Amino acid sequence: MITRTLYIARPCHLRLRDGQLVAEYKGFKGQEDLPDKTAPVEDLGCVVLEHRQINISHALLDHLMQHNVAVITCDQRMMPSGLLLNLEGHSLQSERYRAQIEASEPLKKQLWQQTIQAKIRNQADVLQHWGIDPVFLRERVRQVKSGDTGNEEAVCSFHYWQRLFPAAWAFSRKREGPPPNNLLNYGYAVIRATVARALSGSGLLPTLGIFHRNRYNAFCLADDIMEPYRPYVDHTVRGIIEKTSHIDPMETEHKNLLLSVLSADVWLDGQKSPLMVAVQRTAASLARCYTGEQRRLLYPQFTP
């Protein structure tokens, strides 16, 4: 099922009415004459709450959770800061939790190898799209060992970030670094929420990672599985800075472009679908790997 991402940037009251999310603007200065806006909750996959004066009812929150809608909150800088997910996302949840917890180390190492190989392939394809030599990355894909014991991910990431953006930007990938790190952070946060939602919907624990094990991270598995999806954000950010260098603070149009990544068509296992649907297929394939039904994770192949 194709789902929508709802981005709410105005002050409003959000409530539930007949299974619909309703945004009401009465009582907010300058918006009194705006008509109510509605969206069927069953059509939603992700809701981004950006403005600090958004009020939301508990009834609506509960209904969103029942329909496995990821709710993202934003901080005073209008950057994603929190994520709310359904606690019971699948009918076989306890069975899949058990399979995930009992997964062997060799299996987890193989899954991480596949994940890093897919990420590096997509990074190479992004470079090629922008006219940058991808040969180094393509050759390194074959060097990724089980568990990525040689840390090819780090080697390739250094190479990739040194070349993806024009030299004039003097770019270094740091979470708190200068632009376009802000664009990357925003896009990654949205992808992370989408992956966490898909994992929960497949009956898996987003906290229990394959590789990431930070004791303070509630979404280690989401951070693992999103790795091959990061290049889709990178490509979008490169496209934004091709057109403008005015990206701090981010404009609404830039946020919309980053949110639109979720609806971009991607190729996965020979089929084209929106990225959000591909993420769901990846999560479902991971669940089958844990239960022994298959050994290959399904990841998308980047095509612009």
Image (spheres, grey):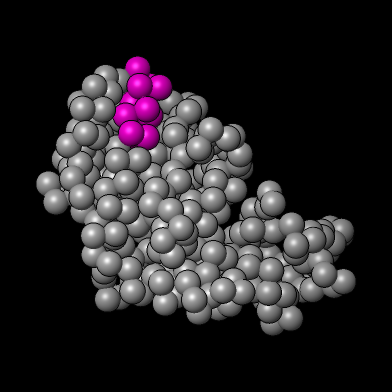
Q: Reply yes or no: does residue 129 show up in magenta.
A: yes
The residue under the point 27% across, 67% down is 104
| Highlighted range, magenta | 121-131
Give coordinates of residue 201: x percent, y percent.
57, 65
Residue 288 against residue 135 in the figure, above or below: below
Spot the residue most to the left: 150
Q: Is residue 42 visible?
A: yes
Give coordinates of residue 9: x percent, y percent.
64, 57
Residue 212 against residue 57 in the figure, above or below: above
252 vs 206, left or right, is right
Tell me the quarter of the picture where residue 160 sits: top left
The residue under the point 38% across, 29% down is 126
Would you say the magenta stretch is mainly helix, strand or loop? helix
Nearest the viewer among 241 and 140 is: 140
Q: Reply yes or no: does residue 152 show up in magenta.
A: no
Q: Is residue 254 visible?
A: no
Nearest the viewer among 237 and 43 is: 43
The residue under the point 33% across, 33% down is 121
